[in-house]
Structures are given as C-alpha cells and as structure tokens.
Image (cartoon, rainbow, N blue to C red):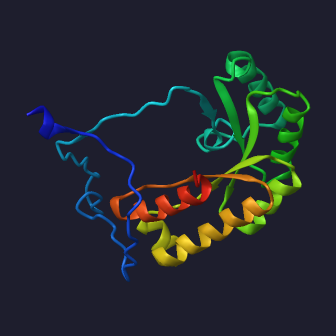
Amino acid sequence: MKSKLIHSNPVKRDYQLHNEKEPNLFREIFPYRKVSRTYFDDSFVIPRPPEDFFITDTTFRDGQQARPPYAPDQILKIYDLLHKLGGYSGLIRQCEFFLYSEKDRKAVELCRERGYRYPEITAWIRAKEEDLKLVKQMKIRETGMLTSVSDYHIYLKLKKDRKQALEDYLKIVEKALELNIVPKSGSVILWVWEYPIREQLYLELYPN
C-alpha cells in the first residue's frame, strides 16, 4: 500500500513543449461560478531537502503588495532587523528589492551603505530588457525574474503562446548572463505541461 501512495520524484531532462493554440485554463479546478477546488491524486512526492537551509526574504517585494508601501527609512530599519535576526549567520541570505521608482532605488542605496554581507541585496524584475537595465545601472549582482508560465498569464495577459513566451524568457536570461548578472527564475502557477518551459529556463540558469 505504501509503495502505491509514495513515490520518488527524480529530476528529469526530457520534457517536451506542447505549443497549443488555445490555453488550458483548468476549468474543472477553477470554475468561474464556484470556489476553486483542491485536487488530490493520492500520490505523495518524497521531499529532497538541501543540506544547507537559508531564507530569501521578500518583505520589500510581495510583502508590500498587501499594505501601503514602505518609505525608504522604514525599509532600512527592517533591513537592519533582518541582519540582526539572521544576517550574521547567513540564515537570511538575501532580500529582494523592486527598482522601478526613485523611492525603490533610494531604499537600495540606504541598505547598501550598511555594508552587510547578509542579507545580500538582490533585485526583482519582470523578464523585460528595460527592467534588466535597471539592475545593471544599480550594479546589483543577482536578480529574480518574473517568468509567468501558466496558460492564463501567457495567452490572456501576455497575448503570446507557450513557444513565444519560452523564447522571450530565454532571451532575457541570456542577456542577463551577457551582462554578468546572475538570473533566477520565478514562476507564477506551474502545471504539468509547463515543465518544459521551467526545465529549459533552469538548464540555462544552472547548466551544471
């Protein structure tokens, strides 16, 4: 019985991209007129935790989306507290910052003046070349990139298909590497078909 319920999830490298003409919106799980459903398949993936645990803090990114935005001096105070809480040991390894407004960039400069090794200041951008230029201008070593891979985002928001989205994301990843910027990918809503996009992005980011 146990062998039927639990299975390992080895890393695979052979996913194939299926470039459909119409989006799969999973209406059986997300119906328009009812509460979304939780799908159970009676199968459990065995976790593979890393030897070294660390935290990437996103207070200054998605942490601001549910409240009034922080002022630069408030961000600096929180950054000091994060350093005191877990920065000495590196447990809180990184903080992610927006760079879009003058206020965002001012906060980065204030935190950078502290000279802390941890949490490292990293950026968070859309997978667009104009956003990547901000990272280069601010001389930030690493940036997260929003690479939305659900059909809802790709077909309905971006007005692209899966192949176009993958190619555009990879272009920005390659551009970041050319600029000696370390890119990391962030997806929004990942489904089975989307593994080829995520797989190819990770192969580009982490070839070894």
Q: Is residue 188 left or right of residue 111?
A: left
Spot occupied by residue 114 in the image (x, y as percentages of width and height): 88, 27
Q: Closest to the observer: 64 or 186?
A: 186
Residue 99 horizontal side relative to residue 13, left or right = right
Which residue is drawn at the image coordinates 16% and 38% (left, top)? 5
Is 44 drawn above or below residue 149 in the view shown? above
How many callouts does the rendering have? Answer: 0
Instruction: Give the residue at the far right of this rendering.
Output: 113
Q: Is residue 158 visible?
A: no
Q: Residue at x 77, y 67 (%)?
A: 130
Q: Residue furthest bottom?
A: 21
Q: Residue at x 74, y 16 (%)?
A: 84
The image position of residue 90, as x and y in percent, is 69, 23
Judging depth in this view, the residue of 32 and 5 nearest the camera is: 5
Query: In the figure, is residue 151 to the left or right of 125?
Result: left
Give the vertical position of 195 relative to 65 (above or below).
below
Q: Image quadrant of residue 26? A: bottom left
- In the image, is 95 to the left or to the right of 27? right
Q: What x and y, as percent, mark residue 83?
A: 74, 21
The answer to whether one can see residue 119 in this image is yes
Pinpoint residue 135: horizontal percent, then vertical percent: 80, 54
Q: Residue at x 48, y 59 (%)?
A: 198
Q: Along the line of sight, which residue is nearer the eye, 114 or 73?
A: 114
